[in-house]
Image (cartoon, rainbow, N blue to C red):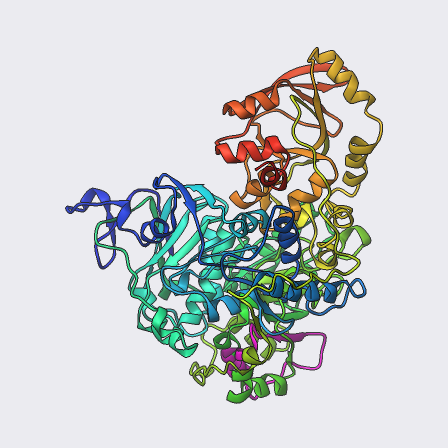
């Protein structure tokens, strides 16, 4: 089904071939990736890229902080199209008025600085950007990790808010030229197989081994031509879960026709690698061999063939159950999956088709065909469907697909991302939900194990979710199921956008006032780095991977992202509830033990004193900057890790002035104190190794902390204390 080729591969004009057997000239400059990056690079050096993007997008749990940071750093107007969508806190269901207060602030900012404002429930961020902005050769930046529009030929990156601040201040996105991995699609998918199935197969083959981590995935091959564009979009958006940096696809007449539907045919251009394009490796996917897949709790890479789970539920669910208990830190049997097995069948309590991955017109229309004339049943199982945009919603109504879904017992809801991060359709305690959404991390669906609430999510394609619904909640594969694959062609009607979207791009009104609600507060002042550094370890996480959801939970906490100090109270709250108290003690309370360690070290001069966390591999998942900034506001000065799960989390640490330390072999315990002599001098001199003394129980041990490569700008940001200070310093 999938092959990983860990060697240089060459595009010969029709397919991939081994570099050793290719007779012509080869070059990485012949890839689509090189062409797009070179067109957006301002450095003059393709090894060290300084990129400017064509447009940006944020949603209502990120744009307030971004605009506040940019405003504090000298923002006068948006220098590029900046789309502010309202698809995360759009239900306005938590925290009183504060969600809608953020929306009012967003509209006022769009007016003042010249932005584009998409009101609540009108469109999911990525649906809107696909429809209105993505096109071949463009580069788009978003403050959401699933910023992926590669199937439309656009190279897109999801990053933390500070990287968007840089663009708003006419600075650049600075990275080394990335590895480029070809993804060759061959053959044609079978009936019952959808984009989520292909995506999960890809994630399952690449995430755990890090094969495509921080690389660009370049999709090529004859298999692309048979895939509808929305099918491609469904694969592409999930590439985030492989830990790649970005993605880009070959384009064809189907992409041109897609853009033409939205009145943008003039933005189309054919895009393909040139013969002789050289890749750092390749993934080969035989589409005709892909089966319906399922990602069991608690990660999109925990992938199995759906048929295997249905055939051997005790074995596979039993293993997932044991691993789940370990991840949740609970006694075996506290988290249950095998109790979902009744008479040899797996019983599901909930189905959800939603958001940027599942909520496309095509997915929902096919699900409607599967359910047409059938019933979801009147038992515990329920199915909810969230279209990605109002134009998709209008088309579903006019085609009859919406009626077919509602007649089957499914419930149609607004254009909303909530089920993806625990702000909508939280399952019941011990519930088991199957979802065509993007993630199924532990606790992300909204349950609270510390309070005795434990639920779980498995990722599946809309087709098999609809088949499961048609079977009354019995886990069912759509492969081989009898249904009509043909759907009424999508017809775009932009009336909803014309009626409600505020487009102020290019026309800022500098006299307009920003409208603040009581929850919107300024970013706290942050001190610059001292000559030396003392760190106290306030949390130790030994899990193989730590997600940003664990560092700062989503769900109801998202309502407080406009209030930095209040949000910081939730840091690690579901992973290490005592962390906030420990960090505050370092920041505000007694420091006798730290003072004793400094004295014992013999180091003289000024000291920065802060807390730190150790995690094996932190930062998987969301781009949310708050995973780092909340630590910073609590007095955090560093993370220590074996490696960082994503570039974007490491960037968030740097942009908030925290040292992204690495250590290969030392063990760390809560309460350990590290003294780093001459930290500022070493940082500013370009050093990558920082000798330190680790104090524990009155004894000291030398350890070496490393940062890996940092740019001169990144070093100065950390020295200044954070990105805002860096810009104020000028």
User: What percent of the width, then of the height, locates residue 637?
Assistant: 67, 33
Residue found at the far front of this picture: 511
Which one is nearer the viewer's eye here, 502 or 595? 502
Q: Is 375 in the magenta?
A: yes
The magenta segment = 365-392
Q: Is 396 in the magenta?
A: no
From the viewer's perspective, is residue 436 above or below residue 553?
Answer: below
Q: In percent of the image, x 69 and y 61: which residue is there?
A: 514
User: What percent of the width, then of the height, locates residue 493?
Assistant: 50, 83
From the viewer's perspective, is residue 556 above or below residue 38?
Answer: below
From the viewer's perspective, is residue 80 above or below residue 709?
Answer: below
**Quadrant (top left, top right, bottom left, bottom right) of the N terminus:** bottom left
Left or right of residue 178, residue 539 in this image:
right
* Residue 513 seen in render: yes
* Residue 323 seen in render: no
User: What percent of the width, then of the height, locates residue 51?
Assistant: 43, 48
């Amino acid at each position: 089904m999938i092959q990983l080729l860990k060697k240089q591969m060459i595009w010969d004009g029709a397919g991939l071939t081994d570099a050793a057997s290719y007779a012509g000239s080869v070059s990485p400059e012949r890839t689509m990736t090189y062409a797009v990056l070179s067109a957006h690079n301002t450095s003059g050096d393709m090894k060290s890229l300084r990129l400017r993007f064509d447009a940006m997008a944020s949603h209502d749990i990120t744009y307030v902080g971004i605009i506040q940071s940019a405003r504090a750093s000298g923002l006068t107007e948006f220098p590029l199209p900046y789309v502010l969508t309202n698809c995360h806190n759009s239900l306005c269901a938590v925290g009183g008025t504060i969600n809608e207060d953020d929306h009012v602030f967003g509209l006022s900012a769009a007016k003042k600085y010249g932005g584009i404002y998409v009101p609540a429930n009108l469109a999911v961020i990525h649906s809107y950007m696909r429809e209105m902005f993505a096109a071949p050769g463009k580069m788009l930046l978003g403050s959401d990790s699933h910023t992926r529009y590669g199937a439309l030929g656009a190279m897109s990156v999801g990053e933390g808010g500070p990287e968007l601040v840089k663009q708003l201040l006419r600075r650049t996105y600075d990275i080394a030229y990335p590895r480029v991995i070809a993804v060759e699609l061959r053959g044609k998918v079978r009936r019952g197989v959808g984009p989520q199935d292909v995506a999960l197969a890809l994630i399952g083959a690449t995430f755990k081994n890090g094969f495509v981590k921080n690389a660009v995935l370049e999709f090529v091959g004859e298999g692309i031509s048979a895939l509808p564009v929305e099918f491609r979009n469904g694969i592409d958006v999930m590439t985030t879960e492989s830990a790649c940096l970005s993605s880009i696809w070959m384009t064809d007449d189907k992409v041109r026709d897609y853009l033409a539907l939205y009145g943008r045919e003039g933005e189309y251009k054919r895009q393909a690698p040139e013969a002789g394009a050289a890749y750092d490796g390749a993934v080969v996917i035989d589409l005709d061999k892909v089966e319906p897949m399922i990602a069991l709790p608690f990660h999109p890479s925990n992938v199995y063939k759906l048929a295997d789970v249905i055939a051997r539920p005790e074995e596979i669910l039993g293993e997932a159950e044991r691993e789940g208990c370990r991840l949740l830190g609970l006694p075996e049997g506290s988290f249950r999956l095998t109790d979902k097995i009744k008479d040899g069948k797996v019983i599901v309590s909930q189905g959800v088709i939603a958001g940027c991955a599942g909520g496309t017109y095509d997915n929902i229309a096919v699900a409607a065909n599967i359910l047409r004339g059938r019933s979801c049943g009147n038992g515990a199982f329920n199915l909810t469907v969230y279209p990605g945009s109002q134009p998709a919603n209008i088309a579903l109504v006019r085609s009859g697909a919406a009626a077919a879904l509602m007649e089957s017992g499914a419930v149609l809801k607004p254009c909303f991302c909530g089920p993806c991060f625990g702000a909508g359709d939280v399952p019941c305690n011990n519930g088991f939900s199957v979802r065509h959404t993007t993630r199924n991390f532990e606790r992300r669906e909204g349950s609270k194990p510390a309070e005795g609430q434990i639920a779980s999510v498995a990722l599946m394609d809309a087709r098999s979710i609809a088949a499961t619904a048609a079977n009354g909640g019995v886990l069912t594969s759509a492969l081989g199921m009898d249904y009509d694959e043909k759907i009424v062609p999508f017809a775009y009607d932009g009336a909803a956008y014309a009626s409600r979207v505020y487009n102020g791009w290019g026309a800022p009104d500098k006299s307009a006032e920003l409208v603040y609600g009581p929850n919107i507060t300024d970013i706290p002042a942050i001190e610059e780095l001292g000559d030396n550094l003392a760190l106290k370890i306030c949390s130790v996480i030994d899990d193989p991977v730590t997600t940003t959801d664990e560092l700062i939970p989503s769900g109801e906490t998202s309502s407080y992202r406009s209030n930095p100090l209040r949000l910081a109270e939730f840091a690690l709250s579901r992973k290490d509830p005592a962390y906030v108290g420990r960090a505050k003690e370092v920041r505000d309370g007694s420091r006798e033990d730290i003072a004793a360690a400094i004295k014992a070290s013999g180091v003289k001069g000024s000291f920065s004193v802060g807390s730190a966390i150790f995690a094996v591999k932190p930062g998987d998942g969301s781009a949310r900057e708050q995973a780092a900034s909340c630590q910073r506001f609590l007095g955090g000065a560093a993370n220590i890790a074996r490696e960082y799960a994503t570039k974007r989390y490491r960037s968030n640490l740097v942009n908030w002035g925290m040292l992204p330390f690495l250590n290969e072999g030392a063990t760390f315990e809560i309460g350990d104190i590290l003294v780093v002599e001459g930290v500022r001098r070493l940082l500013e001199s370009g050093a990558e190794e920082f000798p330190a003394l680790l104090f524990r129980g009155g004894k000291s041990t030398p350890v070496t902390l490393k940062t890996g490569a940092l740019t001169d700008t990144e070093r100065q940001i950390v020295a200044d204390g954070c990105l805002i200070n860096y810009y104020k310093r000028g």
